[in-house]
Amino acid sequence: MSTPLLTLLALLGFAANSLLCRAALSGGAARSIDAGSFTLVRLASGALVLALLLRLRRGGRGATGHGSWASALALFAYAAGFSFAYVRIGAGVGALLLFGCVQLTMLAAGLARGERPRALEWAGLAVALAGLAGLTLPGASAPDALGAGLMAAAGVAWGIYSLRGRGATDPLAATAGNFVRSVPLALALVMLARALDAAPHPSSKGLLLAVTSGALASGVGYSLWYAALPHLSSARAAVVQLCVPVIAAVGAVLLLGEALTQRLLLGGTALLAGVLLSLRAKHPNPSRNLKR
């Protein structure tokens, strides 16, 4: 499978996670599942699907033989912060904080390793961020401080997880191992919430949304992302993820009945233009690339 296709499918999975999480955790006290349980079910179902896929693959070892606790901790920190933040802040502001922190984390790491993005890549990133700001900021109220902090932490954790994934020689196995290791961390979080009597019992709808998020959008989607990462620079991996809020916004219009606004059209167009501009910096001659 080609790197562009792997990247596209992974980004679709990321966007699906936003939609599923929004559907499960919206509604205030009447929401269908609490954030801790959503995180646990999401990670556990993802771990189960990935472990089964790994077992079915010829010659595959168990998931516990792969991945690392450091990557699992980053995965858990992202998933928990993402869930708890969306209980307290809106999806637009949350997306801006999440992916803004992802970009800063991955670009800073790339610069520290000696990567030097071209001027056209910097210009593309600037245009993309301007489009993202135009898509999410106008009309948005100031975010809850705790929710904003949680989403920022989730963005940094996802950036770290993505950077660690660039060295994976077996993306499916590494993702499966990371998911399996993250489950005890999520279980401890739920047990703590239950002890504090701070978590209502989830409904069947909430559980179904969490399982779908974990098994398909997270488990399969993240393994595809790990497969694409070795072929992407830190700058490019950071920039292409800016497409996710646009994909999620379009999905919300088509699947959740949200209005298609002028802000969505203009901001999304600017964001995608910035992404294409940045990618163009690495491939100035498409015909030459096709001949390779």
Image: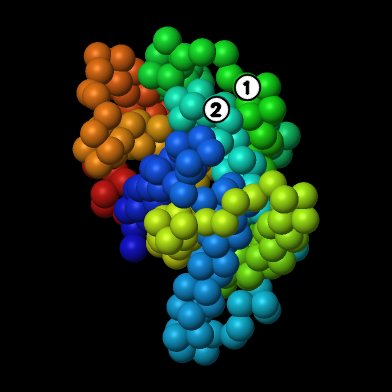
Marks 2 and 1, the one that precedes in the sequence: 2
Q: Is residue 26 visible?
A: yes
| Residue 146: % across, % down | 69, 27
Mark 2 crowd level (few <14, some 14–19, many ≥20, 10 Å Cα): many
Query: Along the horizontal axis of the image, is 162 left or right of 269?
Result: right
Amino acid on which disc 2 is placed = Ile
As measured in the structure, the alpha-carbon distance from the residue carrying label 2 to the one carrying label 1 is 6 Å
Of helix, strand and loop, which one carries label 1? loop
Residue corresponding to mark 1: 144
- Displayed quadrant of residue 116: top right
Colour mapping used in the image = rainbow
User: Which residue position is annotated with label 2?
Assistant: 89
Q: Are marks 2 and 1 in contact (CB under 8 Å)?
A: yes
Q: Which residue is at the front of the view, 113 or 96?
A: 96
Q: Residue at x 23, y 23 (%)?
A: 260
Residue 261 drawn at (x, y percent): 25, 18
Query: Where the N terminus falls, by quadrant?
Result: bottom left
